[in-house]
Amino acid sequence: MCPSVIPRGPGATAWAPETVTTDPYNAETPSAALTEPVTPAGALFVRDHFGVPRLAPAGWRLRIDGAVRAPLALGYAELLALPHTELDVVLECAGNGRTLMTPRPPGLPWGRRAVGCARFAGVPFRLLAERAGIDPAAVECVFTGADAGTVRGHRTPFARSLPLAVARHPGTLLATRLDGAPLTPEHGAPVRLVVPGRYAVADVKWLVGVRAVTEPFAGVFQTEEYVYVDADDGATGPVAGLRVSSLITAPEPDEDLRRGRETLVRGRAWSGDGVPVRRVEVRTVHEDAPEDPSAGWRDAELTRPSGPYAWTAWSRPWTPDAPGRYRVLARATDADGAVQPERAPWNARGYGCNPVSAVDVVVV
């Protein structure tokens, strides 16, 4: 297993991810790249638990077994020969925004940029599920990556399960390409899982095995890690669908703006499980204004997203009429009526953080 470091050289994108940890390598999407409808592959955030396994496509094999009629094993060339689907998908780490929580839970100190909208191409998993013939008694499919490490004293591969309905959904892909090119090692080459509408922990990288099971999977990353731990009663539940969220891409934090000059407040919004964003509201609050979280919200204009799992661009003009410090706020509402909360919903692992987005600026 090699160190998980992205090469930096003449051919590297100018929007390289911004390092959060070095060993293993984890990095956030740079702010400039978030202005793009599709996040360039070379700028997309990286989440790695154990280091990057280097798998040559020629030697890659995927085995599908367990509660199936006909176990399968296929190579990379065989997978490439199958029909491919291309989708724009919001990819968000479950811990995105963790540093906004008070007190801050343990885990990677993500800001709000462990997110992007990636263009993946791959084979719908359901094609292989049909070929293998999953037993009617099966309840889940367990997807296992080639990466592994010591967890609680035991050698543990990274594995997550999906309910059969989600695994068989036409958008669930065995992805081989990102942003029009073959996957790179840090993004799961040669093949990774992509599950639209769910936090990226579901998108098992370096995929090498799928097992249909007749009982719910109880692996470490399913029942001990990547679960919600309630602050009050300790109840747990697995991290699953994306929560409705937004980010502000302009103006930038601490940007100097001019009184009486129009600026365009803009950003991105998204939600989970294919539920579209129906509304984004913007609010600007002067430092001397009385505190009233319910006042001053104005609708932004939405741009049609590039697909059912892509994020939605939004914008609203604003002309500040007085100098001073302002807080610019944005909140999204999805078609199911879910709204971003005023404050980060605290939980012991720091997952699903989706408070109203905020940027502080100065007007002169």
Image (spheres, rainbow, N blue to C red):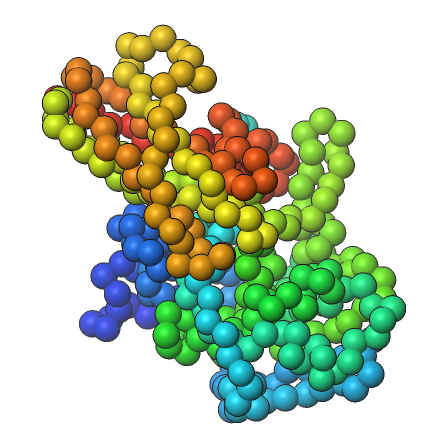
Q: Is residue 222 visible?
A: yes
Q: Position of residue 199 (x, y in %)?
A: 56, 52
Considering only vertical position in the picture, is 257 above or below 131? above
> In x, y percent, where is residue 196?
55, 59
Q: Can see residue 25? A: no
Q: Residue 119: which quarter of the image?
A: bottom left
Report the residue at 60% width, 68% height from top: 170
Is 58 situated above or below 345? below
Q: Nearer the viewer, residue 347 or 108?
A: 347
**Residue drawn at the location 49% of the way across and 57% of the way down:** 308
Question: Which quarter of the figure has residue 143?
Answer: bottom right
* Residue extending furthest toward the right: 137
Tell me how many marks there are: 0
Q: Residue at x 31, y 23 (%)?
A: 284
Q: Looking at the image, which residue is at 69% across and 48% down? A: 238
Camera-nearest residue between 60 and 135: 135
Residue 121 percent coordinates (x, y): 47, 73
Q: Would you identify the image quadrant in which residue 107 lies?
A: top right
- Residue 311 locus on image (x, y percent): 42, 51
User: Which quarter shows the C terminus?
Assistant: top left
Q: Is residue 247 above or below residue 147?
A: above
